[in-house]
Amino acid sequence: MIVVTAALKGGVGKTTTAVYLAAAAANGRRTVNLVDADPQASAAEWLEVAEDAELAEVNLVEAPTERLLARALERTGADEVTVVDTPPGQERLLEKAMGLANVVVVPTRVGGVETPRAAAVLELLPKKVPAGLVLTSARTFTRDYQDAVAEWAEANVAVWGSVPERVGIAAGPAGWLSPEGLEIYRGVWRRAQRAAR
Ligand SMILES: Nc1ncnc2c1ncn2[C@@H]1O[C@H](COP(=O)(O)OP(=O)(O)O)[C@@H](O)[C@H]1O
Ligand SMILES: [Mg+2]
């Protein structure tokens, strides 16, 4: 099963989402691979220093070009899970990755220009590939957040999770995975699995 975290823009929580999803998937018995398709290698760096038990079981593959990415995905075994972290601003690579995915997770922030940006990603998505959103760094008590949830519901786009704005969740390689973040992303992972083709 190939799960792609997709956005055209940086700073929306793609890498955070990819690493937490890999950790959530690693709680089962399956082999989990995290493919870092971003030349910036932030997911790779995170995995290299992480001491979390969940991440110790995750295989890291660095695949920063279309060709390497295609090869890494070809090698995903039938009973394996591969989570792909994608780079910002590379529409072609993103389209290719989404075309090979069983399911796509689109992290997005809330409000302003963020909604049309996430909608643009969904427009690149092949029709047969299921996708859901994760609302990241969310201030769930705000009007902006409520409006975004309502807008996505109206557009018939599934929201698989909302990740509140928390220093603990966003610590990245400098800290531990947060229990709260893990619980939320386990929920996202369950929904993604159910939706996967
Ligand atoms: N739930 C969250 N709460 C607060 N900050 C977050 C959260 N998720 C991500 N961030 C922060 O937002 C920034 C971008 O996240 P990252 O996962 O690197 O996004 P991308 O890979 O899309 O560039 C990072 O500084 C990260 O720590
Ligand atoms: Mg990133």
Image (cartoon, grey):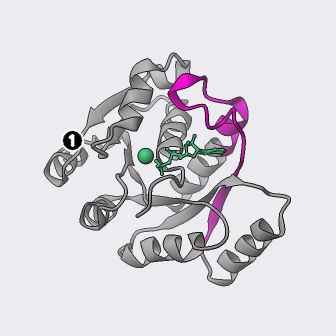
Asked if residue 165 is among those painted magenta in the image, a careful observer would answer: yes
Q: Tag 1: residue type?
A: Arg
Q: Is residue 91 left or right of residue 9?
A: left
Q: Residue at x 33, y 30 (%)?
A: 60
> Where 76 falls versus 173 (above or below)?
below
Q: Residue at x 66, y 65 (%)?
A: 110
Say which of 95 and 32 sits in front. Answer: 95
Res. 127 in view:
no
Q: Residue at x 58, y 63 (%)?
A: 133
* Circle 1 crowding by C-alpha within 10 Å: few under 14, some 14–19, many from 20: few
Q: Is residue 139 left or right of residue 153?
A: right
Q: In the rendered image, which quarter contains the C terminus?
A: bottom left
- Farthest residue to the left: give it: 67
> Where 7 falls versus 189 (above or below)?
below
Quarter of the image where one finds residue 63? top left
Residue 180: x and y, percent?
Answer: 73, 36
Residue 95: x and y, percent?
Answer: 30, 67
Asked if residue 59 is among those painted magenta in the image, a careful observer would answer: no
Residue range of the region highlighted in magenta in the rendering: 158-184
Residue denoted by label 1 = 75
Q: Residue at x 68, y 44 (%)?
A: 184
Callout 1: SS: loop
Say which of 10 and 135 sits in front. Answer: 10
- Farthest residue to the front: give it: 112
> Where 12 falls versus 40 (above or below)?
below
